[in-house]
Image (cartoon, helix red, strand yellow):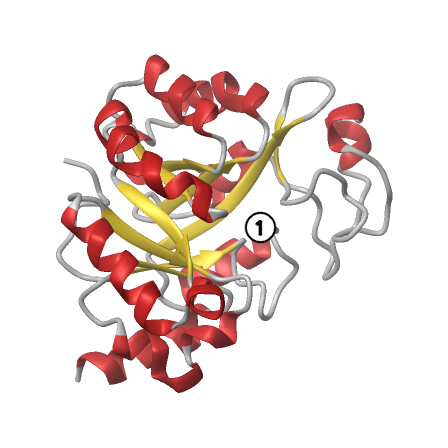
Amino acid sequence: MSRWDVKRILVLGHRGSIGKYPENSLLAFVEAVKAGADGVELDVWLTKDRKVIVMHDETINRTSNMRGKQKEMTLEELQKADLGMKQRIPTLEDVLEILPKTALVNIEIKDIEAVSEVLRIINEFNAEERVMISSFNVNALKLTREMNERLTLGLLVGDEKVIPLIPRLKEELNLYSVNVPIDGISVLGFERFKTALMWLRGLGVKIALWPVEEEIYYRKDNLKRLKGLFDIVITDDPERMLNYLKEIES
């Protein structure tokens, strides 16, 4: 049975715990789990020498003291970069090694060329039950499903264009979840956003919420008002979110 099939709300650290630590660093991942998160969300790319590294952007410019595109650099070159707090760019293997075996890991595929290596690593670590593969790239999810019938898959929603495709994709890919930005409230308004979540619920998928702007969870008690319509919360600050969810549920 997949570790994702639980009856309570799951909390994942967004790129670790980026409210307090360098994003997508081992320190951020470890501290997110220490704070009580069920696991972490991270992003992966393939390097020039076909190693799977954890990085959000297409370049290392924003998050490190170096510049360049990871796909044009070797792992050895990339690991010279400093993420802050003495943290280096980790590989996916590094993350799976350092986290407890109970921790869930949502791996967002940023680079479709990384899919086969990611699946190899998941298999090597016997991590299938605790991993979710998510992506905005439908083709990356299709490729993942072709290569593995059992993995938990999540479709990331980036804009409204993908929404009409969801019923078909749910069946075609056996989607576990649709991963929706809480910032959709700012675009649609609260009531339309809530209606969209209810519609997704009716399709039989889990709802994972993720932030561009973390504060939207808390503004006007948005998350409290969506109670019962989400299953996973991806958060920049797991400790704060866990305390808030306790308040909601009490």
Report whether 19 appears left or right of 146. Answer: right
Which amino acid type corresponds to the residue marked 1 in the rendered image? Leu
User: Can see residue 231?
Assistant: no
Residue 73 coordinates in the image, percent (x, y) = 80, 26
Up-down relation of residue 25 to residue 150 (above or below): below
Residue with the mark numbered 1? 26
Q: Can the viewer see residue 20 in this picture?
A: yes
Q: Nearer the viewer, residue 123 or 107?
A: 107
Q: Quadrant of residue 168?
A: top left
Left or right: where 171 falls relative to 154: left
Numbered circles on residues, count? 1
Residue drawn 49% across the image and 47% down it: 158
Q: Is residue 228 left or right of residue 69?
A: left
Q: Classify 16 as above or below 163.
A: below
Question: Which residue is at a point 21% across and 28% down the rendered structure image?
Answer: 171
Residue 77 vs residue 219, the one in the foreground: 219
Residue in view at x 33 percent, y 39 percent: 164
Quarter of the C terminus within the rendering: bottom left
